[in-house]
Structures are given as C-alpha cells and as structure tokens.
Amino acid sequence: MPEFIKSISAFLIKALLFALLLFLIHSYLIFQFFNGKLLIPVWAIHCFNIVLVILVYSVMFLQTKKGEKKILYHFFALTILKMILAVLFLTPLFFKESSHLRLEIINFFIPYFLYLGLEINGVYKFLIKI
C-alpha cells in the first residue's frame, strides 16, 4: 500500500498544480473577454474534471497492482463513464437559455480534453513501469 500512496500523492501534486494553472488561465480568459457571464462556473468545470482524473488514475493504478490483465478495457469503460458524466454535467445548457451556447460548450470541452491528456499521460507513465 505505501507504493500506492507514493504514486497517488506524486500524481496528485502534479495534477493539482496543473489544475491550478489551467484554472487561473481559464478564469482570466473568461473574465477578460466574456465578462464571466456563463451558466456553468469555471471553478465547477475544473473541480469536476480534476476529481474524475484522480479517480480514473487511482482505479487504473489499483487494477494494475492487482495483476489485472484487461487494463485497456477498464480504461475504455472509465472513459465512457466520464463522457456520460460530462453530458449529465452539461444538462443545464440543454434546459436554460444561454446567449453564448457555443462558448459554454467550448468552455467545458477544452479543459476536458486537457485533463484527459493529463490522465492519459499519468496512466501511461505507470503502465510503462510494469
């Protein structure tokens, strides 16, 4: 278990620093160019994404340590689950009027894909060690 805690804590530090930097840049751009008027707040987008990234990383790490051979299937299943959760997260956009619907969608998916890249990079790094 100490290896799990060491690996998770190292990834957690990197992920939180990445999230903080991305959040600051994202917040600046939204408030500078769009006056911050969005249905889904920037902080909620980043909290949603970073929590899912850490959960997926943890599950993948635990599965590999158990000796699970079908890691790719687990990763695909977790990614599909993340996509479903993302659609559920975006439901306020479907039911409320927004003057900037495209901006709202782009506002979510650019960070989503950046966090997905972070997740893939983290999972790839510990899979190489196996």
Image (tube, rainbow, N blue to C red):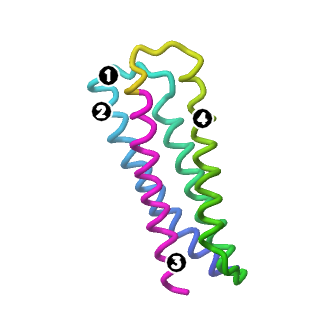
Identify which amino acid the numbered label 3 is placed on. Answer: Phe
Mark 1 residue crowding within 10 angstroms, few (<14) / some (14–19) / many (20+): few
Instruction: Please report whichever mark, 4 or 1, sits nearer to the chain's N-terminal start.
Output: 1
Q: Amino acid at mark 1?
A: Phe
Magenta residues, start to end: 104-130
Identity of the residue furthest to the bottom in this view: 130
Pinpoint residue 100: horizontal percent, then vertical percent: 39, 19
User: Horizontally, is 96 left or right of 42 in the view?
Assistant: right
Few, some or many residues within 10 Å of mark 2 (<14, 14–19, 20+): few
Give the structural element (helix, strand or loop) at label 1. Answer: helix
Determine which residue is flagged by label 4: 89
| First in residue order: circle 4 vs circle 3 | 4
**Do residues under tags 2 and 1 come within 8 Å of each other at their CB atoms?**
yes
Kind of residue sitting beneath label 4: Phe
Which residue is located at x 44 percent, y 41 percent? 109
Disc nearer the start of the sequence (2/4): 2
Q: Mark 2 or mark 1: name the one nearer the start of the chain.
A: 2
Provide the residue designation for mark 1: 34
- Nearest the viewer among 94 and 61 is 94
Please identify the dominant SS of the magenta region.
helix
What percent of the width, then of the height, locates residue 54?
A: 58, 58
- CA gap, disc 1 to disc 3? 39 Å
Percent coordinates x, y for residue 115 in the rendering: 46, 53
- Callout 2: helix, strand or loop? helix
Residue highlighted by disc 3: 126
Q: CA distance from mark 2 to mark 4?
A: 22 Å
The answer for how far apart the CA atoms under marks 2 and 1 are is 8 Å
Seen in the picture, residue 2 relative to 56 is either above or below; the reply is: below
Q: CA distance from mark 4 to mark 1?
A: 21 Å
- Alpha carbons under labels 4 and 3: distance apart: 29 Å
